[in-house]
């Protein structure tokens, strides 16, 4: 007989799997970040907000169409040696 788990536990397990996929170098995050403002070209990455570059990967959840000039809210993790990695972007 299969053991049933609550939806909350399943969500936590899914989040852990996604975090492992998002960080292929298996480096621990050194913190979190949140940015809000107009999306501009980055100095070292494709995108930045208020002068803060961030990386967008295939594992980044994007709601809306991300483009230069859009107003967006970006949340993510800071990974040592990589920088700010966006986990969620909401384009307004």
Image: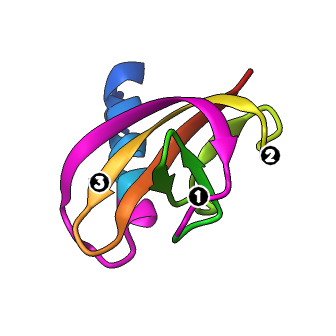
Provide residue 84's location: percent of width, then percent of height: 38, 55
Distance from disc 1 to disc 3, alpha carbons, whole Å, reads 12 Å
Determine which of the numbered discs, if any, sits on residue 78 in the image: 3
Q: Is residue 70 magenta?
A: no
* Dot 2 alpha-carbon crowd within 10 angstroms: few under 14, some 14 to 19, many 20 or more: some
Q: Earlier in the sequence, mark 3 or mark 2?
A: 2
Residue found 35% across the figure and 63% down from its top: 83
Residue found 56% across the figure and 67% down from its top: 45
Residue 8: image quadrant is top left
The reply to whether residue 6 is visible in this rendering is: no
Residue found 63% across the figure and 62% down from its top: 58
Of residues 25 and 52, the one drawn nearer to the viewer in this rendering = 52
Distance from disc 2 to disc 1, alpha carbons, whole Å, reads 12 Å
Q: Secondary structure at mark 2?
A: loop
Q: Which residues are magenta?
A: 20-43
Determine which of the numbered discs, if any, sits on residue 67 in the image: 2
Q: Is residue 52 left or right of residue 3?
A: right
Determine which of the numbered discs, if any, sits on residue 86 in the image: none
Residue 68 against residue 43 in the figure, above or below: above
Q: Earlier in the sequence, mark 1 or mark 3?
A: 1
Q: Where does label 1 land, which residue?
A: 56
């Amino acid at each position: 007989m299969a053991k049933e788990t609550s939806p909350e536990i399943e969500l936590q397990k899914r989040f852990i799997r996604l975090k492992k996929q998002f960080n292929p170098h298996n480096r621990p995050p050194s913190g979190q970040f949140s940015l809000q403002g107009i999306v501009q070209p980055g100095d070292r990455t494709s995108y930045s907000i208020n002068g803060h570059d961030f990386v967008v990967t295939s594992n980044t959840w994007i709601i809306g169409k991300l483009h230069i000039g859009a107003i967006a809210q970006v949340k993510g993790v800071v990974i040592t040696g990589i920088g700010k990695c966006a986990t969620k972007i909401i384009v307004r």
